[in-house]
Image (spheres, rainbow, N blue to C red):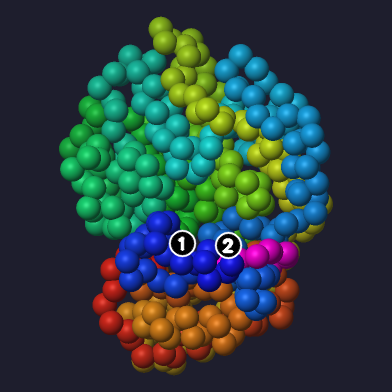
Amino acid sequence: MTAPELLEFDRAHIWHPYAALKNSPRVRLVESASGVNLKLKDGSELIDGVASWWCVAHGHNHPAIVEAIKKQSEKLSHVMFGGFTHESAVNLAYELTKKTPEGLNKVFFADSGSIAVEVAAKMAVQYQYARGYPAKGKLIALKGGYHGDTCTCMALSDPDGMHTLFRQILPTHYFGEPDDMGSIEVAFQQHRGEIAGIICEPYFQAANAMRFYSPKFLKQLREFCDKHNLVLIFDEIAAGFYRTGPLWAHSRAEVKPDIMTVGKALTGGHITLAATIASEKIADTISNSSIPAFMHGPTYMANPLACAAGVASLKLFEESDYESKVKRIEGELIEGVSPCREFDNVLDVHAEGAVGIVKVRRLPSREDIDRIIDSYGVWLRPFSNFIYTMPPLVSTTEDISRITEAMRALASCPPGPEISGDFHE
């Protein structure tokens, strides 16, 4: 098909994330990608200012990761993980547990971040079952949080967020506020016989709230979970792998979870893979119970191609000083987005790590967003009332300058009409 035919078939038949089939936002036909750049079929290029939803840490089509996938494909593209293992899975688990907090070394590979969170929730519940508390099947989560689009993940995300349409099919969980231990204690006291654990995005809430909160709160959660024998889950899928500065966002609090989830940058954004990593205490308690098998098993669990990409990605993280790269990016983002405070439509501005956020009263019109993207050559995907960037961690000073220039242009636009979920994450 020609480019127009491809786009026409797409418009008629293919759903895109958080978009309608009719009168949907414009989509652009990508031909190839390299580094921070997306090359479109029409010959134009865009800097990927959101790292293709925050996962392309090392840049698109990194030769080391591409080569790892090619080599693996020549030997083994897939094999069921039930009854088999393979070198790439073992190597990835080994490399991953070298980077996780001490004692977190039991790895469950998942197809995606959402599945990793589903697995973490099931681990918490099965752990409490193994302890002799079968009624403990609920979690406390944080308002403003986002953990994915599968049912348990939606139920653990902001109860007033993007998933309210599906409340009738979602299980009930309970919520507190970030930086407010009183709200956590109230939720626990009201439902203490049901609570298996607490889940949060440590330090940085991404796709729903785009906000940072105090590391002290993570310490308070750890103490509270220890006191009441609750499982503490840190969802590091968005914030991990240096996105907020250090390797893990929770390291600022100098505490460790019982279970953590990782994904997105795990493979450098080259192929889907995530992992749920449990402590020895969690794993041993489940393993020594009347139901010793952990009851989950995706078809593509530990896919060899994805695991090979993960090993290559983790080696890249080891070989380069990403903490310093992100520190430079942080300074450039602060300098680049701070002038947005002057614009009438802007409510707040924040930049930390490789995250730059401009909160506006209302987003510009769809036409203005497309115009800025095209004229500045920068791919941004505003949502809710946020204009933001989470660029590849290999972005240069020039890349960041162009990204923030486009953000300033968007922030200076007049507010557009009220829109539905078209630009939502």
Left or right of residue 258, residue 31 in this image: right
Question: Is residue 28 visible to us here?
Answer: no
Start-end of magenta stretch: 29-36
Per the rendering, the mark at residue 341 is: none
Q: Which residue is mark 2?
A: 1
- Type of amino acid under label 2: Met
Give percent across and percent down for residue 303: 63, 32
Give percent across and percent down for residue 201: 45, 50
Q: Residue at x 30, y 43 (%)?
A: 155
Label 1 secondary element: helix
- Where residue 32 sits, quadrant-wise, is bottom right
Q: CA distance from mark 2 to mark 1?
A: 9 Å
Q: Is residue 111 above or below residue 134?
A: below
Q: Does the magenta run of residues contain 381? A: no
Label 2 secondary element: loop
How many C-alpha atoms fall within 10 Å of the one at disc 1: few (<14), some, or many (≥20)? Answer: few
Q: Residue at x 69, y 42 (%)?
A: 310
Give percent across and percent down for residue 424: 38, 64
Q: Is residue 210 above or below residue 367?
A: above
Q: Is residue 419 above or below residue 195?
A: below
Q: Nearer the viewer, residue 197 or 333?
A: 333
Question: Is residue 110 visible to us here?
Answer: yes
- Type of amino acid under label 1: Phe
Per the rendering, the mark at residue 9 is: 1
